[in-house]
Image (spheres, rainbow, N blue to C red):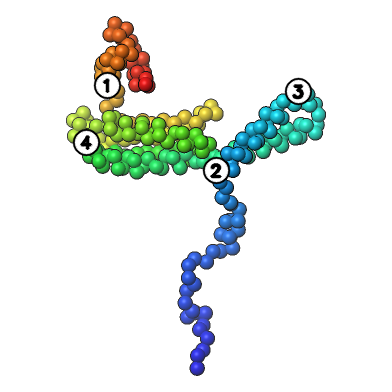
Amino acid sequence: TNTPMSKKNSPPPLGKVSTKSERNQSNKTIRIGVGVLDELLELIGEVVLGRNQFLNKFSNDKGFKTLSQSITKLHQHVIQTRMQSINVLFDKYKRTVRDLSKKLNKKIELTIEGGDLELDRTIIEGLADPLTHLIRNSIDHGIEEPEQRSKVGKGVVGNIALRAIHESGQILIEIEDDGRGLDRDSILKKAIAQELVTEEETKGMENKDIFAFIFTA
């Protein structure tokens, strides 16, 4: 006769069985479309502007003060929903450095600092292309080949540091490499050739002014 399988001999359940704590945690978060967040920020911005128009007229009204404080808190919360960790952006460059250094036969190590700081997602998206350009420049033109680094007493592994720093209420993004640095004469020669400056005007120019030409279109 068939006997029921004991609990000890029963087959394992298919898939992962979520625990009560995991289910409770999943219920605390929801996905919201970016378009909804953008519209929400635009609407609360209009509410803040409307509130500001009545500040002088109702500044002594207790009810208006309470409403004003609630609007301020609501504005802060809406902004917070749009914040993302900078690591979302920084982590992408690990592959950029790995692939490009391999292609150019260079040995490069990327160091990331401050990736846990947060920025508005729109700002992070706007930083993606400029940072990619800067990092590629460090790999292409800054970091030397291993043989060249050895000749000048450097380690064969080049270093690129990508940092996010909170300073005086601002987030500063820094990219630093230990490559050959800027070629003063090459920059000066190109600036003259493109008629950004005359040879006469370059006499007595400080290095920082010459290096500034690299930011010229």
- First in sequence: mark 3 or mark 2? 2
Can residue 155 be seen here? The reply is yes
Q: Secondary structure at mark 4?
A: helix
Q: Are marks 4 and 2 in contact (CB under 8 Å)?
A: no
Q: Does 87 sit left or right of 133 as displayed?
A: right
Question: Residue 166 location in percent, x, y?
Answer: 50, 31
Residue 4 lies, with reference to residue 154, above or below; the image says below
- Report, in whole angstroms, how far the alpha carbon at label 1 lies from the one at label 2: 44 Å
Write down the residue under mark 3.
Answer: 56
In which quarter of the view is residue 141 placed?
A: top left
Q: Secondary structure at mark 3?
A: loop
Residue 203 lies, with reference to residue 29, above or below; the image says above
Crowding at mark 4 (Cα within 10 Å: few <14, some 14-19, many 20+): some
Q: Which mark is residue 183?
A: 1
Mark 1 vs mark 2: in front: 2
What amino acid does circle 1 point to?
Asp
Q: Secondary structure at mark 2?
A: helix
Mark 3 vs mark 2: in front: 2
Question: Residue 160 location in percent, x, y?
Answer: 34, 35
What amino acid does circle 2 point to?
Val
Q: Are marks 3 and 2 in contact (CB under 8 Å)?
A: no
What amino acid does circle 4 point to?
Pro
Write down the residue under mark 4.
Answer: 146
Write down the residue under mark 2.
Answer: 34
Out of 126 and 169, give the one closest to the viewer: 126
